[in-house]
Image: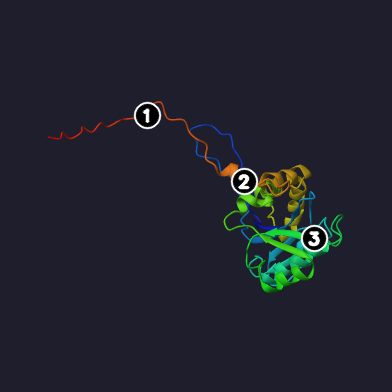
Amino acid sequence: MDEKGFIIGMSSKAKVICRTGRRPPRVTQEGTREMLTVIECCCAALYVISSFVIFKGAAHYMGWHTETSDPEAKFAYSPNGWTDQKLGLEWLHHFDKHTRDQQGCNSRPRLRILDGHRSHINLEFCQYAIDNNIELLCFPSHTPHLLQPLDVCLFGPLQNYYGKAADDYVRNTYAAVVKGTFWKFYSAARRQAYTKENLKSAWRKTGIHPFNPNAVPTQLVAPRSAPSPASKTVVLQIPKKSTNV
């Protein structure tokens, strides 16, 4: 599992073809810069559980997700749109509900791999996991960008699909992307990004499933560069001191 932050009005990057010698063209973007957080969880069995969306706000409004196409998605709020210990525990309940009865689980433990953020690693969180047969495994520090399947293969395409959909909407309708329309674009981007091929590739590239301890180390070894033909090796010869017998 991992969190992904979104700026609601931010569109994707784009390449523009224009005449040389002119000023770079500019595209007007919608001005909303409000943050929200989405917690996602992908499974090695090649499926994802429903999203857990955290809006910025002081109360919950049904209008934020009237267009949801996923009745199992969970919506919450916090003062800054970020996760905290309370919401982290709510998400763990969400995870338990959607994985407990999955085929093959039965009474076997479920392994949950996550980073060491304080919203995940606290007494209540860990106690609930122990009581409900959920094993917790944290990534080593400074390694999620290499070991986290969501970071490696899934969040990049997800951001691109969402940004393009939001950008097209703003250009065609001249209307802002707001909380009530965010889910429409996000759920469409999610369907495009979370394909079985992408999920399988994400687990394989991190070496977690199938287990391959050499998957990541091979990415860290810098390739040997051939010496430049212009470079020359200079050998200094130091004369020996003469000795008198």
Mark 2 and mark 1: Cα distance apart in space: 33 Å
Mark 3 and mark 1: Cα distance apart in space: 61 Å
Label 3 sits on what residue type? Answer: Ala
Q: Mark 3 points at which residue?
A: 73
Give 147 or 49, whichever is nearer the viewer: 147
Determine the secondary structure under disc 2.
loop
* Quadrant of the frame with the C terminus: top left
Determine the secondary structure under disc 1.
loop
Label 2: few (<14), some or many (≥20) within 10 Å?
Answer: some
Q: Earlier in the sequence, mark 2 or mark 3?
A: 3
Q: Which of marks 3 and 1 is nearer the N terminus?
A: 3
Tell me if 195 is positioned left or right of 118 in this view: right
Q: Quadrant of residue 92?
A: bottom right
* Quadrant of the frame with the N terminus: bottom right
Label drawn at residue 231: 1
Across and down, in percent, residue 145 comes to 61, 51
Q: Which residue is drawn at 78% across and 62% down?
A: 95
Label 3: few (<14), some or many (≥20) within 10 Å?
Answer: some
Mark 2 and mark 3: Cα distance apart in space: 33 Å
Label 1: few (<14), some or many (≥20) within 10 Å?
Answer: few
Give 140 or 51, whichever is nearer the viewer: 140
The residue lying furthest to the left in this view is 244
Label drawn at residue 214: none
Q: Residue at x 85, y 57 (%)?
A: 102
Label drawn at residue 216: 2
Give 131 or 15, whichever is nearer the viewer: 131
